[in-house]
Amino acid sequence: MIGGISAMPLEPEVISRDGNAMVLSMGPQHPSTHGVLQIMLEIEGETVTKAEPEIGYLHTGIEKSAENLFWTQAQTVIERMDYLAPESNSLCYCLAVEKLLGLTDAIPRRAQQIRVLVAELTRIASHCVWLGTHGIDLGALSIFFYCFDLRENILDLQEAAGGARMHPNYVRIGGLNGDLPDGFLPKLDALIEKLPGRMRELRALLQKNPIFQDRTIDVGIVTPQEAIDWSLTGPNLRASGIAYDVRKAFPYTGYEQYQFEVPTRAEGDAYARFLVRLDEIDQSLRIVEQVRAALVAGPVMLDDAKVAPPPKETIAISMEALIHHFKIVSEGFRVPPGDVYQPVESPRGELAYYVVSDGNNKPYRVRTRPPSLYNLQALKGMAPGNLIADLVVMIGSLDPVFGEVDR
Amino acid sequence: MPSPQMPPLATSAIDPTAVRPPIDDAIIERTAPARVRARLEALKEEGFALLLDVGAADYPNRKPRFDVVYHLLKLSPAAASVAQIGSPQRYRLLCGVPEDDATVPTVSDLWKSADWAEREIFDLFGIQFSGHPDLRRIQMPVHWEGYPLRKDYPLRGPAREKAPRPDFALKSNIVSGTPPTGKTAQALAEQVMQARKEHGDGA
């Protein structure tokens, strides 16, 4: 004992030895695993022979919590699943509940447009975080600051609209929490003007960088057949050459009105996934510009006091509004029984909620289709035969968010 | 768990999936554990190549008690453009699983992605998947007891549910009589002035 601390030698992370093979636990403290992923690796020298990701370090029982909250309250925990793209989660959940309520066609046009706007902005912000951290994983530190500076502009807009940077809870069942505040659109215009230049900078930093190319080209190749076997969706699927995008295949909240392309790549390696995401930011910007130009005036919330709380200013002057407000806040509203599967295209792929209502004022079951979980699972197929250093590239290029993997 | 403030509806649906016609664009089919594997094999042959998700739900008052829900998408690996994909067909296969024999054959050999999805259902609902190569808990700790997403599993966990919630109001400074420790800015400024005087600091 030295100074009260045991002087036992540190236990090495070796669990078993078998000839040249070795089992190594990578993470959850390894920087590239972002603190919450453990991978049990079987290695021979530097080559991975088997990789088994262990998840659950961030399991917070969100689906269970949601079953015990009112329909509107459940949204606050659901938004915390994919904390890099909160608007995708809340939009998907609201669309599902609106389908159960039979209100899909009753959502005001302005609310739908702003929903598309925030969903695309959150996609850009999410891809910025991915690009910055992916760069750091590969030793490219500068890009992180460029990306987070850009993301900060979008978080400012989120904060202006919803009141919070990370979890604005802006999209609500029946529409939006409130209209865009004064000063939002000028800030948005400034962002739209600034973004193409910023994208050129980001591309200049990494796209032709020989070290980055060496680390990512031909690393973690996923063939189209493998992509389907592992249920990949989103940019990971499209980098393998399959142009499946929920926004095009099953348009929701008015995506069919906007012109955009679905970037795909045939190579299926980490570099292809990098390029697809960069192209997606450009396409998202195109949608944002179109929404900005087409924005109509009008209400942003459904005019149905049984579902949507009446405007705050009416509560002081109308007894009926006060009663509706009290009823919605104190006991919520009831949703007709039924089940529905509602997908949206989140930055990580097909995010969907399978929502069941038994006719009560709380969701009976909210099953998430977490794109990150399925994307991360593909690591089991990608890793064998590659170097440990390449594993870091593969994790980064799959873009998992563990709030969503573990829920 | 219904809250004490709001009793559940007397007419609450025992099987919400059966009360009204489908409102989404999927083909919906019900099946039983004995036939589910054959159905999924046939669907995969038909072109439903992408297993989007395997989920589950618990209906304690219904027989069979559980539903294992397969979501499929008709997608071909050769579909390289948006036009080729169009609007692919969705398929939802609900498999009722009885409580006394909660076992479903695995499909993790048909779709690699079913592996973790089935582990999660085993972990949170306690439904066994026969033939699964590595059926162990995935989200909860390995030695956890009980299946958290079952409806009869208490929200705050079995150990803590018996104890009442801590009464935070009783812990406040005012109630317990603890004097407030914070100082106002003015009091601090006065204290600094006093100290300077005592030390004869002319500044």
Image (cartoon, grey):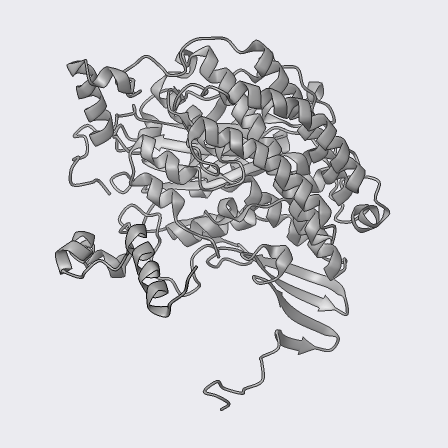
The one nearer the camera, B66 or A277, is A277
- Left or right for B88, reference B8: right
The residue closer to the viewer here, B124 or B43, is B124
Q: Is residue A356 visible?
A: yes
Count of picture labels: 0
Quadrant of res B95 = top left
Which residue occupies 36% across, 32% down? A356
Q: Tell me which residue sits at (58%, 85%) in the image.
A: A9
Dividing the picture into quarters, in which one does residue A80 lie? top left
Most extreme residue toward the right is: A210
- B31 over A20 or under it: above or below: above
Q: For residue A282, which quarter of the picture?
A: top right
Q: Residue at x 42, y 38 (%)?
A: A78
Query: Is residue A239 left or right of A128 when viewed as pictured?
Result: right
> What residue is rendered at 37% in x and 20% in y?
A174
Residue B203 percent across, percent down from the top left:
43, 59
Viewer-side residue, A111 vs A218: A111
Compare residues A23 and B45 and report the one nearer the observer.
A23
Estimate the x, y position of residue A359 in percent, counting from the top left.
26, 27
Residue A277 placed where, x, y %? Answer: 69, 35
